[in-house]
Image (cartoon, helix red, strand yellow):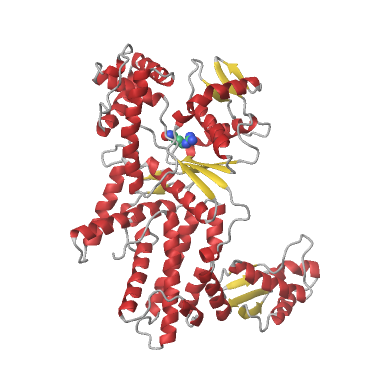
Amino acid sequence: MKKLLEMISEEMQAAFEEAGYGETEAGGQLGRVTLSNRPDLCEYQCNGAMAGAKKFRKAPAVIAGEVAERLRGSKVFSQVEAVMPGFLNLKLSETFLRDYLQDMRQAEKFGLDKPAKPQKIIIDYGGANVAKPLHVGHLRSAVIGESIKRICRYAGHEVIGDAHLGDWGLQMGLVIMGIKERQPDLVYFDESYEGEYPVEAPFTISELEEIYPASSLKSKEDPAYKAQAMEATYKLQNGVRGYRALWQHMMNVSVTDLKKVYSSLNVEFDLWKGESDVRDLIPEMVQYMKDGGYAYISEGALVVDVKEETDTKEVPPCMILKSDGASLYNTSDLATILERTRLYHPDQIIYLTDKRQDLYFDQIFRCARKTKLVEPGTKLKWIGFGTVNGSDGKPFKTRDGGVMRLETLIQETRDEMLRKIKEGREMSEQEAKEVADMVAISALLYGDLSNQASKDYIFDMDRFTSFEGDTGPYILYTIVRIKSILTKYAEQGGSPDDREGLELLSASSLAEKQLMMQLAGFNAMMESASEETAPHKVCAFIYDLANAFNRFYHETKILAEEDEARKRSLIALLLLTREVLETCIQVLGFEAPEKM
Ligand code: ARG
């Protein structure tokens, strides 16, 4: 379905042409219409007469006047006004707008067209590392990645989300050493042992989470210990049985826990692959890079040059193997590109990490292109996100200055939400808790997603959980308000899913018309959110939509409306508003309760 602005622009363009003002030399269309930047004067505007003045050697006001003349009686505009020095101020026809909403309601996905060429997209997000707890820094990768996945899927692309676990590096060796320190007699460390290993893991998740930081700290203070951890990593990577068995336990225990935390944020991965999954591809890839003349030895390490003539900054070579032959973060990322190419032939791979990894991804992408690991038609896209800060503007910490665990942050948000929900509401403890959990997730997700990904933001518990302002709870509150009106309508004997009434809509007040115009922008918004992988656009849209709805609600008699036909039309408008809002929060990753 055509976008509203496109349709309006076409009408305007036709008028320019009829009046004898066709295309400009540059091929530009004079009839382009934009949203008004003076909403007090008009809804839309067209500045084409100003742009055409030079080419047609006429005063802009004359051109504008002639174009306005042509549009008299237009079905699209209820008002076309040529004003000095040559602007066209426009108002949309109410019937045209109503018909547009009618079409939108009947169309699939509210009029969002399928992409001309649907893509196969892999999204690599989450960034979790096995045996290390998720902390607040992991929130953004998970939340933004999940939303981009849902937006692109809704837009009609095939999207595969992959957790790409950090499960193969030095951290694994560190954990193995930490376990060995605590329980040196475990059978896993007896390299002559040939029997079956126990099914039960020799640690719990909380023990595992204590082991890593302690071991990591020790390795920084004690070089001999670090060397042992490196050796353990090497043994693991080279298939020493006991180490592999221990590693498998870590994977099981850790992944179970990760799934729990991610699912509490409504984050779901299609693939739970990790760095370790490409271990067998590495030797082949290394050989290929050597044979192709791409990789060479520099100071003992195997590297590929990736600098380019146009570089304005230093881009160091991409390291493939360390001097001791060990693979690194780079190696598994490159091998993963190879694997993804072979298995999926994706049109695009999108990565979400902290923005400090920009140089790293620059190197990786260049290396993958240069060595032709990736097909020429595959786009590699990295989205670097900003930091979550505390109110002091510094990276978010716990009260005592430690790293904030993601689970703790989620729990604190739930507690705060529960406190707010219980204030002045009559709800059973159980119900209040369920509602609070749902609303808390909206607070966290919306608080994050409403910011442009690349920007840092301040985590402000009080603001994020507020029912007013640009927040998740405010959006949910608006949806719940609509639901409750529809329920009451049903109690009065009305049919709350009667969409037919839309054809009777009159846009009789300004607030009603503004709500309708906002709804009509859905397809354009969703298309650009998908093309630009920008969840914040969805947030901005629903914030405006919720505001438009609430203004309308405060000014309009709905259930008390006596004219039955009009009442039906208002109910249909409410229904459409609710459906559009619900579609939008679904792609952001959260849901609305029935009551709150
Ligand atoms: N595990 C990594 C980290 O903690 C993030 C992984 C990001 N994805 C990737 N393909 N490199 O920094």
Q: Is residue 72 above or below residue 17?
A: below
Tell which residue pokes out farthest to the bottom in this image: 562
Report the residue at 33% width, 13% height from top. Answer: 191
Q: Is residue 552 above or below residue 593?
A: below
Q: Is residue 319 visible?
A: yes
Report the residue at 50% width, 52% height from top. Answer: 153
Quadrant in the picture for residue 591: bottom left
Q: Is residue 110 above or below residue 345?
A: below
Picture coordinates of residue 398, whole percent (x, y) = 29, 41
Q: Is residue 371 left or right of residue 426?
A: right
Report the residue at 25% width, 16% height from top. Answer: 184
Taking the image in four quarters, ligand 1 sits in the one at top left
Numbered marks: total: 0
Picture coordinates of residue 86, whole percent (x, y) = 69, 74
In the image shown, does 512 or 167 lie closer to the viewer? 167
Tell which residue pokes out farthest to the top in this image: 192
Q: Is residue 34 visible?
A: no
Q: Which image quarter holds the C terminus?
A: bottom left
Q: Is residue 138 above or below residue 504?
A: above
Picture coordinates of residue 353, whole percent (x, y) = 47, 40
In the image shown, does 346 or 446 lie closer to the viewer? 346
Q: Which image quarter holds the N terminus?
A: bottom right
Picture coordinates of residue 276, whole percent (x, y) = 44, 28
